[in-house]
Image (cartoon, rainbow, N blue to C red):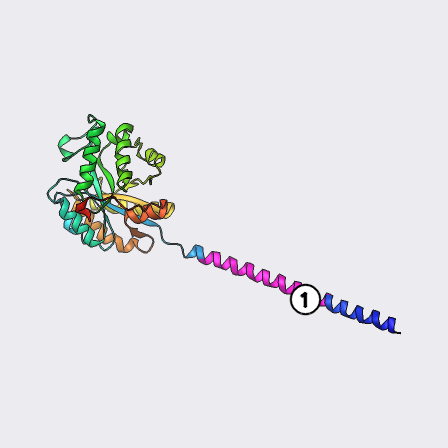
Amino acid sequence: MSTIFSRWFRGSHLLKFRILAVGCLGLSMLYNMNLGYADASRVDADSSSQGKPKVVVIIDDFGNGQKGTEEMFQMPVKLTVAIMPFLPTSHRDAELAHKRGYDVIVHMPMEAKTGKSNWLGPGAITSDLSDSEVRKKVEAAIDDIPYAIGMNNHMGSKITGDKRIMSIVLAICEERGLFFVDSKTNYHSIVGQLAIQKGMPPVTNHIFLDDAHTTSHISKQLQEVELYATKNRYCVTIGHVSAAGKKTAETLRTRIPQMQSSVEFVGISDLVREEWGWNPPPMLPSNNR
């Protein structure tokens, strides 16, 4: 009798244990399924919270009181101001841009394949310069523009295809904590290739806003900017203060609020930091501190 009872007792407990194990397994499966759903919803939430496509607006040719200068300083979004060195308002424009919270870059004059030499401005890089002369001019230009965090080319269709000269220019930018934006005045430019080799951001202009000086064209180009940014995460575009400066400024002011529903306007420093992790402190001269 005791043997029968013992067997019954052990069997009863074994059955309870099996029931408990099955129950735990079911709870575990349900828990894991719920975790799976939770993870899926978290990924969806993360992807849906990603930011809007970025648009960088660079405005070239500051430094000489060109048309549209004052209007550009009243823009409701962060611009990137490209200032030519050694001109009457170079320092003033850099100070104003900095106070407005805009990014400042050096608009470095560089020899073009065609065009008038007097369009270059002072301190230009030309193909006949020696290595030491190129270095001296680039360093002087950086020293002349307070708060500069980068550089782009003014004209420069000839120089941006010259490996010798652009290697020197990029080396100096790297030494000074600056990056270089290829304005893309030469479709055979080697700037991007050299930048990648040096571990620098290969940032380039995608669309010129005012290559034709009409409001309708500038507005059309801004539509292209919005489309490009939507397809490619970001777009860098270049406009100018100059003959069409006021038209460019007015069209920007009109279109920016409409575009802000689909894109975010940022400075070039924001873009290179987010896209390429570039954030070195610029090695600035005393006039920049």
Query: Label 1 belongs to which residue?
Result: 23
Q: Hey, which residue is sitting farthest left in the picture?
A: 88
* Magenta extent: 18-45
On the image, the x and y values in percent for residue 254 come to: 23, 53
On the image, the x and y values in percent for residue 185 come to: 25, 34
In the drawing, does residue 6 fall left or right of residue 47?
right
Q: SS for tag 1?
A: helix
In the drawing, does residue 136 fall left or right of residue 180?
left
Q: Is residue 24 visible?
A: yes
On the image, the x and y values in percent for residue 117 come to: 15, 30
In the drawing, does residue 195 fall left or right of residue 31?
left
Q: Hey, which residue is sitting farthest right in the picture?
A: 1
24 inside magenta stretch: yes
Total count of labels: 1
On the image, the x and y values in percent for residue 228 come to: 34, 45
Instruction: Examine the residues drawn in magenta and state their main secondary structure.
Output: helix
Which quarter shows the N terminus?
bottom right
Residue at 28% from the left image edge and 35% from the top image edge: 171
Q: Mark 1 is on which residue type? A: Gly
Query: Please, is residue 119 above or below residue 39 in the view?
Result: above
Residue at 12% from the left image edge and 43% from the top image edge: 64
Query: Please, is residue 123 above or below residue 267 in the view?
Result: above
Q: Nearer the viewer, residue 284 or 231?
A: 284
